[in-house]
Amino acid sequence: MERDHVTDDDEGKAVVDSLGQKIGMISEVKSGTAYVNADPGITDTIRSKLGWADADQDDYPLEKNRIHTVTDDEVRLKDDF
């Protein structure tokens, strides 16, 4: 099922641009805002999938209006404005 907003269950999902290129990973969802780690290593990916990661100074908030769709596997962004 596709949607246009993130939930806590989206932590650990890949973030891809409108062309499908991976640009990061959701490290944490806090109050409906996704935080993106733009260069996750394997350890970060595993920690996030297990729910052990928290956003830090290297993670960036993802504006809700930038999200095109959220699927079971990824968060796809809209085309650049």
Image (tube, rainbow, N blue to C red):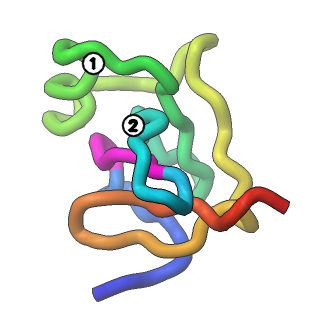
Q: Where is residue 44 in the image (x, y as percent from the top left)?
A: 27, 18
Decide if residue 49 is on the left or right side of residue 23.
left
Query: What's the CA distance linking mark 1 and mark 2?
Result: 9 Å
Q: Quadrant of the C terminus?
A: bottom right
Q: Is residue 5 magenta?
A: no
The magenta segment: 11-16
Q: What amino acid type should be assigned to the residue bearing mark 2? A: Met
Pointer 1: residues within 10 angstroms few (<14), some, or many (20+)? some
Residue 75: which quarter of the image? bottom left
Query: Would you say the residues marked 1 and 2 are in contact, meaning their CB atoms lie under 8 Å apart?
Result: yes
* Residue drawn 42% across the image and 25% down it: 54
**Residue placed under numbered mark 1 in the picture:** 44
Q: Residue at x 69, y 64 (%)?
A: 79
Q: Is mark 1 on a helix, strand or loop?
A: helix
| Left or right of residue 69, residue 43 in this image | left
Disc 2 target residue: 25
Q: Is mark 2 on a helix, strand or loop?
A: strand
Q: Which amino acid does label 1 sit on?
A: Asp
Task: Count residues near mark 2 (Cα–Cα under 10 Å), then give few for <14, some for 14-19, many for 20+.
Answer: many
Residue that lies at the very extreme toward the right in this rendered image? 81
Q: In this view, does 44 lie above or below 49?
A: above
Q: Is residue 31 left or right of residue 8?
A: right
On the rendered image, what quadrant is the N terminus found in? bottom left
Task: Please determine whether, in this image, residue 31 is positioned above or below residue 5.
Answer: above
Say whether residue 37 is left or right of residue 72. right
Q: Residue at x 57, y 60 (%)?
A: 77
Give the x, y percent position of residue 34: 55, 47
Question: How far across and how far down the image is residue 62, in percent?
Answer: 65, 47
Residue 38 versus residue 7: which sits nearer the camera? 38
Nearer to us in this view, 29 or 23: 23
